[in-house]
Image (cartoon, helix red, strand yellow):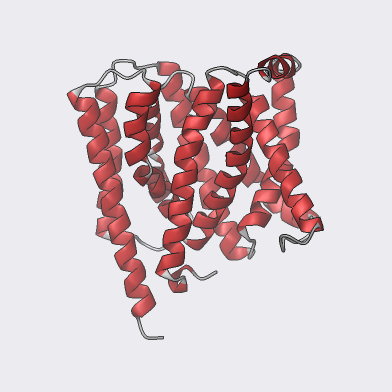
């Protein structure tokens, strides 16, 4: 799909869908890992559910996803590795970082994607885009200075997650543009290729079989069971909307959506999940961070309108 001719409403729909799913997933995962610390097992089950649903949907004719192709799978191995690295480190960081600061740190991703774009010869960005992305990063730095619950392990895990997220989004954008793969097809390959890697991790880290025993014991709790099932469902929805947004828009836009969804999730994180000591620097940084995201969104929307109205 040519991004320059994509209707603005479709770009907006893809971005909003990803933003809502991403915001919901942060809170659901946080609720689950607070009671179930085996994050690798959780991720493995999310990927299994995704692969099975898409495979079943293709058999039933509910999706036009193409059958499994070995050559395509080889091209997407790196996407899968970077994706799982991102989610694994993100889940680990949630054990030590409060929701508002987790969201703020993840907002460094747009700057990382912007820099990564310089290395694979992507077109130049406008001054407004560069300045707005820089503003979001500056907000993160200021907010971190006011985070008195600073957890070094959590911060390191979140920053590593930023690196992995940058790499897989850049690769997904290139796969959609160069190989003509749909968001569902990329999601299917990503989930399927993830399973051997994740199975190895849960064995090496010692999660298995303890994680299965704990899951069985926790299933007696209706609250946990509901949250766990929601986590599996939202994992599927999040992956689909993320790949759709990256293909329809760009890797950079997908990361900036994370800034916009932070307006609601940051506020809710302060009041619902706690663990945050409010400070002037903390709040100021988050506000600056959000303003940078809004500025970027306006700049990109104006660019999209100009491209779609230019005579062909």
Q: Measuring 68% from the left and 56% from the top, which residue is drawn there?
A: 185
Query: Between residues 159 and 63, which one lies in front from this camera angle?
Result: 63
Is residue 211 toward the left or the right of residue 148 in the image? right
Q: Measuring 40% from the left and 27% from the top, which residue is drawn there?
A: 99
Q: Position of residue 309 (x, y in %)?
A: 35, 79
Residue 119 seen in render: no
Query: From the viewer's perspective, is residue 96 above or below residue 107?
Result: above
Q: Residue furthest front?
A: 222
Q: Residue furthest right?
A: 59
Q: Position of residue 151 (x, y in %)?
A: 39, 16
Instruction: Tell me which corner region of the image, top left, top right, bottom left or bottom right, holds residue 127.
Output: bottom left
Is residue 77 toward the left or the right of residue 254 in the image? right
Query: Between residues 252 and 103, which one lies in front from this camera angle?
Result: 103
Identify the image quadrant of the C terminus: bottom left
Residue 293 seen in render: yes
Q: Position of residue 32 (x, y in %)?
A: 56, 24
Identify the image quadrant of the N terminus: bottom right
Is residue 210 toward the left or the right of residue 36 in the image? right
Q: Measuring 74% from the left and 29% from the top, which residue is drawn there?
A: 199
Q: How many tags in the picture?
A: 0
Q: Residue furthest left?
A: 280
Q: Position of residue 235 (x, y in %)?
A: 59, 40
Query: From the viewer's perspective, is residue 276 above or below residue 230?
Result: above
């Amino acid at each position: 799909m040519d991004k320059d001719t994509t209707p603005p409403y479709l770009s907006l729909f893809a971005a909003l869908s990803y933003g809502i799913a991403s915001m919901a997933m942060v809170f659901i995962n946080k609720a689950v890992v607070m009671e179930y610390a085996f994050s690798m097992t959780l991720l493995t089950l999310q990927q299994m559910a995704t692969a099975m649903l898409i495979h079943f949907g293709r058999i039933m004719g509910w999706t036009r996803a193409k059958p499994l192709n070995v050559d395509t799978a080889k091209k997407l191995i790196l996407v899968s590795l970077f994706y799982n690295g991102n989610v694994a480190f993100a889940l680990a960081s949630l054990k030590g970082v409060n929701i508002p600061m987790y969201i703020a740190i993840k907002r460094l991703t747009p700057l990382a994607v912007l820099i990564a774009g310089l290395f694979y010869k992507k077109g130049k960005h406008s001054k407004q885009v560069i300045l707005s992305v820089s503003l979001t990063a500056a907000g993160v730095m200021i907010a971190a200075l006011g985070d008195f619950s600073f957890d070094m392990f959590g911060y390191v895990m979140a920053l590593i997650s930023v690196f992995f997220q940058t790499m897989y989004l850049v690769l997904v954008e290139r796969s959609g543009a160069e190989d003509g793969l749909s968001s569902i097809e990329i999601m299917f390959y990503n989930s399927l290729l993830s399973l051997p890697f994740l199975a190895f991790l849960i064995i090496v880290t010692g999660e298995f079989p303890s994680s299965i025993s704990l899951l069985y014991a926790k299933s007696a709790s209706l609250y946990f069971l509901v949250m766990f099932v929601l986590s599996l469902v939202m994992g599927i929805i999040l992956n689909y909307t993320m790949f759709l947004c990256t293909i329809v828009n760009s890797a950079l836009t997908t990361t900036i959506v994370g800034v916009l969804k932070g307006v609601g999730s940051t506020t809710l994180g302060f009041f619902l999940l706690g663990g945050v000591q409010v400070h002037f620097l903390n709040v100021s940084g988050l506000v600056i961070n959000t303003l940078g995201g809004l500025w970027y969104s306006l700049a990109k929307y104006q660019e999209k309108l100009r491209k779609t109205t230019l005579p062909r």
